[in-house]
Every structure is written in structure tokens, then in C-alpha cells.
Image (spheres, grey):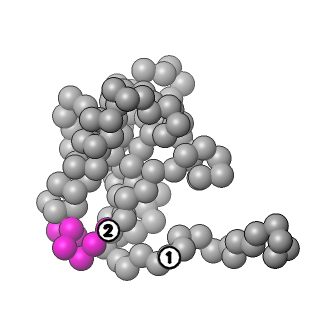
Amino acid sequence: MSADCLFCKINAKEIPADALYEDDQVLAFRDISPQAPHHFLVIPKKHISTINDIAEEDCQIVGHMQLTAAKLAKQLGFSQQGYRTVMNCNQHGGQTVYHIHLHVLGGKPMGWPPYQETLKTPIEQ
């Protein structure tokens, strides 16, 4: 646990969250700023700051995060229509809380690319 980590505090029940699922490895809760009709996060109980910090022994937890996402999407009734899972890494990846978390978004069609700006390579600029 990291003392200054928002998600560690949610795991420790120091900060309330709208929990959907919890077991000994993960916690899933609704995002406070939903970007889709269904938007929840799946976080490991173990503090792992970024995707870059995932160790060999964490592979089972990361897989369990995906299985939990699929289980909840089915329970909430949007698995057959489809959904998106996203893990952001560091600043340019859009990570704002430095405790890995899986965003699960569903309930509407998802576009691609998921950003508004047109990316140009240095040659095109």
C-alpha cells in the first residue's frame, strides 16, 4: 500500500466508492466521472504504480482484472453488445492515478481513435 495513493485508500476503505465487486485480489467500482453509460474501474489490491511496474509475479492479478471486467460486463448486461477495456500508462498515456487500473466502458458504440486530435508525424508537421 502506498500512503498517498487514492486507490490504495479506496482499497483500505478510507475513501468511499460505489463498489461493484471485491475479492482477495481486486476491487471494482464505478468511475466518478463516467465517460459511457457503464464505466467502472477494476484495480488490484496490490499497489502497482504503472504498467511498466508489472512484475512477472503480477501476471495472474492482471489476468484476473480482465476476467473480472468480463464477468461484470455480463452481470450488468452489456457484454454481448460490446465494451472497451483500457489501461493507461504514464502522462502521455493519460494515467492520472498512479496505481494500475482497468477502465471498463460500455453501453454505447465506441469510436476509434479514442482521442480528438489528429496526430502528425514529425515529417508531416
Residue 26 circle label? none
> Residue at coordinates 26% horizontally, 53% vertically from top-left?
69
Q: Which residue is mark 1?
A: 112
Q: Is residue 100 left or right of residue 19?
A: right
Q: Quick one: quadrant of the N terminus?
A: top left
Report if the CB atoms under discs 1 and 2 are less than 8 Å apart. no
Secondary structure at badge 2 equals strand
Q: Residues within 10 Å of mark 2 (few under 14, many from 20)?
A: many
Residue range highlighted in magenta: 77-83
Determine if the magenta segment contains residue 80: yes
* In the image, residue 38 above or below residue 69: below
Q: CA distance from mark 1 to mark 2?
A: 13 Å
Q: Quadrant of residue 47?
A: top left
Residue 24 in sight: yes
Viewer-proximal residue among 112 and 27 = 112
> Residue at coordinates 51% horizontally, 50% vertically from top-left?
88
> Residue at coordinates 63% horizontally, 74% vertically from top-left?
116
* In the image, residue 77 above or below residue 23: below
Instruction: Give the amino acid at mark 1.
Output: Trp
Q: Is residue 71 left or right of residue 9?
A: left
Q: Residue 54: image x %, image y %?
A: 44, 33
Q: Which residue is mark 2?
A: 83
Q: Residue 14: image x %, image y %?
A: 38, 27
Query: Which of the marked residues, 1 or 2, is nearer the chain's N terminus?
Result: 2
Q: Residues within 10 Å of mark 1 (few under 14, many from 20)?
A: few
Q: Quadrant of residue 74?
A: bottom left
Determine if the magenta segment contains residue 109: no
